[in-house]
Image: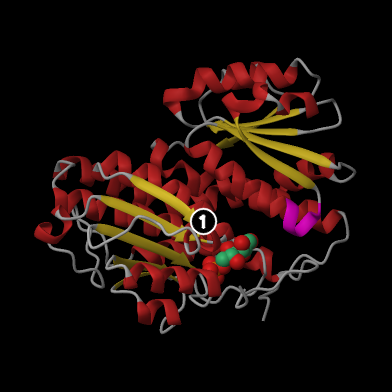
Amino acid sequence: EKGGYEHFMLKEIHEQPRALRDTILGRLEEEKVVLQEVDLSSEQLSQMHKVYIVACGTAWHAGLVGKTLIERWAHLPVEVDIASEFRYRSPLIDEHTLVVVVSQSGETADTLAALREAKNRGARVIAITNVVGSTVSRDAHDVIYTWAGPEIAVASTKAYTTQLEGMVLLGLYLAQVKGTLPASKIGEIISDLKEIPAQVQEILDQESSIRQLAQSFVGVEDAFFLGRSLDWAVSMEGALKMKEISYIHAEAYAAGELKHGTLALVTEQTPVIALATQRDVFDKTVSNIKEVKARDAKVFGMTYKGNTSLAKSVDHVIYIPETRDELAPILTVIPLQLLAYYVSVARGCDVDKPRNLAKSVTVE
Ligand code: F6R
């Protein structure tokens, strides 16, 4: 059932090109996104003043990426909330609010409760979920299914990357209905999106280099993940993967925020993974990388193939295929998943069933 892989997690990491292909299948025309299960007229959408994205864990991390995409493309303000916070803080939502809940299982208790709270307050609810017929899919007004297929490993991988695609599709759809992006621009993004599954495969083909790199983390107690903008959002996911399956304390930090306290923790004992794909903040990120280098941290940078400038400021560079910044998260997370996986294996941890964790959290 593990298809020849040692763990479900590794199998699911490798299923991502297929999962990503399936999730966009039939949803992309040349300059148009088609979401069969979402039915928002431009009239209805013009009544929406705000978007809330609500989820837990990895799905919440997908929401953090979604915020930037929706704000950038559809010009709607977006708040991203953890479901267990959202539901207890009387959020300011009404019939002018679009609520997007994200849940792989579609059964997470807090996410479900948040969905119901949002509906009670009159919001329109769109679900991004992986399980057909799940409670979340039934309770939401509209659904965008991710087609990752069953995810068995506790640590989410293919569900996250397909959720990111769900966010891209939703962002483009909202922009299309609102008319905030010209069709030609939507067409350009679509053609880049179609390249993503093969680019993920390209990264997976370099797996052995990440496996080697994992050796540097085996005896480590703490690690930092840095980035700005969308790289920061992916850093959080990378740090979570590292924590949950390898039990290394990992912290994700907005690169520019480091010097406001956290830099005190950086020493030669704390490896730093620095994502530097977002072109508009690349130079700023490099300045922050120099700050951690000055504290003797070992730095592993990540950027696009062809960007030779990062190599000067870090100890090792992981290169990903070139894409537009908004799609980079789907690529940058792949080496981070593999890293967490191989560190977990090297430390002898129970990769698929980490201690204290359950696949589906149906308690509050
Ligand atoms: C982490 C992980 C969890 C889930 C979270 C939400 O790898 O898998 O953080 O993302 O429990 O689960 P769903 O998406 O099923 O609501």
At which x and y percent is residue 357?
73, 69
Q: Quadrant of the C terminus?
A: bottom right
Q: Nearer the viewer, residue 364 or 324?
A: 364
Answer left or right for 204 relative to 176. Answer: right
**From what the image shows, is residue 161 above or below residue 250?**
below
At which x and y percent is residue 109?
54, 75
Q: Is residue 31 visible?
A: no
Q: Is residue 127 visible?
A: yes
**From what the image shows, is residue 260 above or below residue 249?**
above
Q: Nearer the viewer, residue 111 or 249?
A: 111
Which type of secondary structure does the marked residue at label 1 adopt?
A: helix
Q: Nearer the viewer, residue 255 or 216?
A: 255
Q: Is residue 244 shown in magenta?
A: yes
At which x and y percent is residue 150?
55, 77
Q: Nearer the viewer, residue 169 or 84?
A: 84
> Which range is magenta?
243-247
**From what the image shows, is residue 120 above or below residue 265?**
below
| Residue under numbered circle 1 | 60
Q: Residue at x 56, y 23 (%)?
A: 285
Q: Quadrant of residue 94?
A: bottom left
